[in-house]
Amino acid sequence: MLKTLLHLFNKSTIAAPVRNRNMMGFADKQAFLDQRKNAEEKRIEENRPHQVLYFHKVDDPYSYLTASYAGEILKRFNVEFTPVLVGDDVSETVHEPSMYDIHCLSDAKRIGPYYNVHYSKDTYPNNSLVKKANSLLINTNKEQFIHNALELAEVIWGNKSELSGDISTNELSDTEIQKILNEGNKLRDKAGYYFGSAFHYEGENYWGLDRLNHLEDRLTELKLNKENFNDYIISPAFNAPEDFTSEKKLNLHFFPSLNSPYTFVSIDRTREFASKYNLNLITRPVLPMLMREMKIPLYKAKYIISDAAREGRRYSQEIDKIYSPLGQPARRAYSLFPIIDSFGKGFEYIALLMDASFNQGINIGEIDKLKVIVNKLDINWDEVESDLDSDEWKKVLSDNLNDMYSGNCWGVPSYKLTDDDDANPFYVWGQDRIWLLKEEAYKRLS
């Protein structure tokens, strides 16, 4: 049954109704709240404590960030905190392996200083160090796990040259280590997740520091927060003001795709950032991953959509009715992009298409629906009709994708910030990094 659903989810045409129902089910706010309610009722019925799982992977660069703050959960909340040592990420969820490791280390190093976590290493640890770190943590009791994990992370990624003498150095065999990692991976898989450096509480996953606030909100709603702790665990040291005016000018290249829920929840903040920093906003759409012959397992699709919906509620850009434009609808909508962009309305065209697909549940492949969208842009349909279903868009999107890949980004939304002559490109991947773009823009403009 699971394989059938997975096959249907990735099909571009026949399975559209099934795919749309699945996507709406994953994003639905009431279903989200019901899941939380049912999970708590089941926990009480089974007489289990409030337990937060933490999936720690020693050779994941983000583990340095999460280990730096994970201990605060136990300090601030009345929960049982259970660290779980995990091994390799699930391979079918890593779509560009050669780029993935580069991206993770680069991204962690960039954001680390804002969280007072400083990386000094430019490469991943060798197998010997990974083996030693796993051995040490396997031999560590639960109470000391985070302390030791952080000290190991400081050796693996930070400035520390060696471990303190009070940590055991009894190395286990490869077989013993792999047995424990496999057990951890099974727990992670059962939780519906696939990477390390993540937290789990009763049916819901929270990746890294980017989602820690959602976990805190949930635990607070359950009245598990201790007295004197009413603020969030993390207060990043941002420097950039909300808006900034300068005689200098920067270009912000925006790489969206029409089937991406994360793109949808980024639209308003992208527009606002470009406006408040007076940036030249250049819209560079790319094909959805599923139209680039990539496969997304159902459990990853569920996390992506539910997480994007969770983020959308946080930023007041909620996903509601969904009609996935995979296949012909996307191709038809993209065919009008070059001509509409030539009128200076490319971003707003994409914004309206996204709203139709992820808020109104409209099939953007229907010509009458596209006519309505074009009219909202104050463009006469007669001016664009000859471009409908033409092929010019294919080269445009291919060039955009090649540029995005050159910046070591393969998912959307991605961004490229440059000087006004397009020099000094600064690429980031994800709506989670709009704040980092703002920090970079502020550095360049001030």
Image (spheres, rainbow, N blue to C red):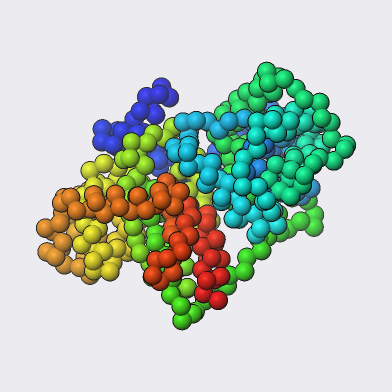
**Is 2 or 343 nearer to us in this picture?**
343
In the displayed structure image, the side of residue 444 where residue 389 appears, left or right: left
Q: Quadrant of the C terminus?
A: bottom right
Picture coordinates of residue 347, whole percent (x, y): 33, 63
**Is 343 or 416 nearer to us in this picture?**
416
In the displayed structure image, the side of residue 351 where residue 209 appears, left or right: right
Q: Quadrant of the N terminus?
A: top left
- Residue found at x 56% / y 50%: 106
In the displayed structure image, the side of residue 200 where residue 383 appears, left or right: left
**Is 68 or 231 nearer to us in this picture?**
68
**Residue situated furthest right in the rendering:** 166
Picture coordinates of residue 123, whole percent (x, y): 61, 43
- Residue found at x 26% / y 32%: 14
90 up-or-down from 374: above or below = above
**Residue situated furthest bottom in the rendering:** 247
**Residue situated furthest top in the rendering:** 175
Picture coordinates of residue 290, whole percent (x, y): 35, 39
- Residue found at x 69% / y 54%: 118
Whether residue 218 can be seen here = no
Whether residue 380 can be seen here = yes
